[in-house]
């Protein structure tokens, strides 16, 4: 793991010391040193890989606390953390109010610095793991979404089942109407064969020419259902299944 960081301090000796400590720490990478918070702010907004700021509190023009508040109100809030460095320990409470990772009181040794850096390392390790876990769970949920492959022209098109609004049979072809696009998919198959591939609990055959997604039905009466602006009739052949569906939803 390499943590990109910057040092911000208006005292040249203190800035040089922090920069040297960063360069001595194998998992820290010094992206820049700044003698005022306003110059640092430009780097913070323009460097997407920046993760950690060693930040002095008492500075002219813009204090470290004020800079931390600006970061806290921006889109950098989640992935940029702050370790305050100051000669005034009375600011500790203010530092933790802006969710600082740690607080180093000058003069501090490399041992003190490395303890704060280790805390940052542990934080980013857990943060990266949580992002990877969330990404894995999202992918897993997507993989578990039911889908079918439709032969459209000369290729197979993966189609999420929950994207389907309704299906219309046209002799040897069917048109599959989707939520995500205005143009339906035209595939060479029969309505019966396609119905066998669809989850029975999500779709309902209403007519020899129509299958509908039950979740897409906006309204219904005894003879038809409404899906968006389309009215789809219910034929006598499938009326029993349709009535059974209605009975489940009638209060």
Image: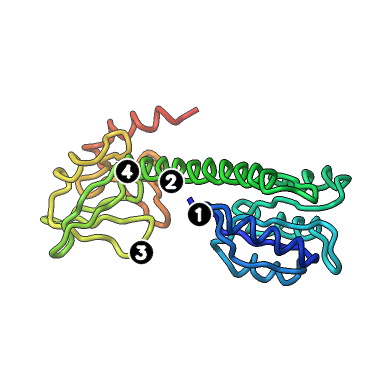
Depth-wise, is mark 4 or mark 2 nearer the camera?
2
Location of residue 65 by image quarter: bottom right
**Local crowd size for mark 2, using a 10 Å CA cut-off: few (<14), some (14–19), many (≥20):** few
Depth-wise, is mark 2 or mark 3 nearer the camera?
2
**Local crowd size for mark 1, using a 10 Å CA cut-off: few (<14), some (14–19), many (≥20):** few
Residue matched to label 2: 135
**In the foreground, 231 or 118:** 118
Residues under labels 2 and 1: Cα distance?
Answer: 21 Å
CB of mark 2 within 8 Å of CB of mark 3?
Answer: no
For label 3, the SS is: loop
Residue matched to label 1: 2
Residue 223 location in percent, x, y? 34, 42
Check the image and tell me how it is coloured: rainbow
CB of mark 2 within 8 Å of CB of mark 1?
Answer: no
Depth-wise, is mark 4 or mark 3 nearer the camera?
4
For label 1, the SS is: loop
Q: Is residue 124 above or below residue 186?
A: above
């Amino acid at each position: 793991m390499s943590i990109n960081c910057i040092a911000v301090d208006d005292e040249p000796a203190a800035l040089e010391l922090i920069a040297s400590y960063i360069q001595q720490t194998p998992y820290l990478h010094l992206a820049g040193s700044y003698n005022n918070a306003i110059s640092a702010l430009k780097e913070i907004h323009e460097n997407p890989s920046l993760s950690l700021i060693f930040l002095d509190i008492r500075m002219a023009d813009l204090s470290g606390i004020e800079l931390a508040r600006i970061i806290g109100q921006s889109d950098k809030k989640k992935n940029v953390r702050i370790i305050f460095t100051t000669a005034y320990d009375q600011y500790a409470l203010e530092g933790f109010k802006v969710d600082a990772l740690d607080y180093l009181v000058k003069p501090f040794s490399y041992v003190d610095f490395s303890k704060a850096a280790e805390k940052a390392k542990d934080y980013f390790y857990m943060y990266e793991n949580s992002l990877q876990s969330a990404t894995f769970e999202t992918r897993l949920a997507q993989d578990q979404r039911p889908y079918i492959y439709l032969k459209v022209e000369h290729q197979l098109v993966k189609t999420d089942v929950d994207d389907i609004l309704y299906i219309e049979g046209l002799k040897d072809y069917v048109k599959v109407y989707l939520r995500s696009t205005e143009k339906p998919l035209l595939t060479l198959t029969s309505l019966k064969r396609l119905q066998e591939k669809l989850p029975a609990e999500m779709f309902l055959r209403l007519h020899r020419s129509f299958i509908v997604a039950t979740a897409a039905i906006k309204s219904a009466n005894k003879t038809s259902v409404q899906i968006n602006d389309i009215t789809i009739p219910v034929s006598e052949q499938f009326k029993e299944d349709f009535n059974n569906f209605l009975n489940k939803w009638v209060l």
